Amino acid sequence: MRHWVPLSLLLLVAVPAALFAEIEITPVAGYRFGDTSTTTHIPGTYCAPGQFCMAEGNSRDSEVFGVLLDVPIRGDLMLEFLVQRQKTAVRADLGVLATPLIPEISTAEEELELIHFQLGLARQWRLRKLTPYAAFGAGIARIESRWPGEVSTAVDDRRFSASLAGGVKIPVADWLGVRLETRAHYTEMPERFHEALFQVELTSGLSFRF
């Protein structure tokens, strides 16, 4: 499954390049801020016979990396492809809900890897020295989660995701620019999380036009 990311990036570049005369590729890096109201089942804990305890948790802020590819459709309207990857964690706190069968799980972090694959539209407005834009996209999120230690329980799932973005492009040359962006993500989570994940990120990158 990990080979999907480089393969997806290759397809993002190769397919539009073969079909369209002009494309814009932007590798990006930034920081994604976590959701403060994630609910999850805790393996190794039981609040009732046969039922895992549920606990409130916070998803950790962490770095995000990815690539955006924009293909002009008409005027300043563009088709946008997005692939992004984030490694984060959800820290759960049982409080007084129950005594875990494995004590250290009450403060453990559930590791999460999120990979977003989205397709959407972007609209830009060309000004004299910069180009503001807005974008939205929807697609699939690959979610891999794992509790550490003896209760290691891996979950590998695919869920719906969507995002809204706004930012500016600053031209440096005809073929090069700087892109600054804020993007809000909505990600459906596996059933045991009970809630969707809402995150906001700040990213920047260099845009290459071909």
Image (cartoon, rainbow, N blue to C red):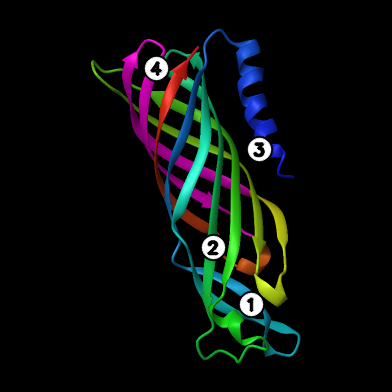
Residue bearing mark 2: 89
Of circles 4 and 1, the one toward us is 4
Report the front residue among 121 and 155: 155
Image coordinates for residue 169, horizontal then vertical, percent: 34, 25
Residue bearing mark 3: 5
Q: Secondary structure at mark 4?
A: strand
Return the disc, 4 or 1, that comes first in the chain's sequence.
1
- Label 4, label 3: how many angstroms apart (C-alpha)? 25 Å
Q: Using the image, determine if residue 126 lies above or below residue 36.
A: above
Number of residues whose C-alpha sits closer than 10 Å to that of mark 4, classed few (under 14), some (14–19) or many (20 or more): some
Identity, as a three-letter code, of the amino acid under mark 2: Ala
Which residue shows up at 55% across the image and 53% down it? 87
The magenta region covers 160-189
Return the disc, 1 or 2, that comes first in the chain's sequence.
1
Which residue shows up at 46% across the image and 49% down it? 63
Q: Is residue 173 magenta?
A: yes
Q: Secondary structure at mark 1?
A: strand
Identity, as a three-letter code, of the amino acid under mark 1: Ile
Return the disc, 4 or 3, that comes first in the chain's sequence.
3
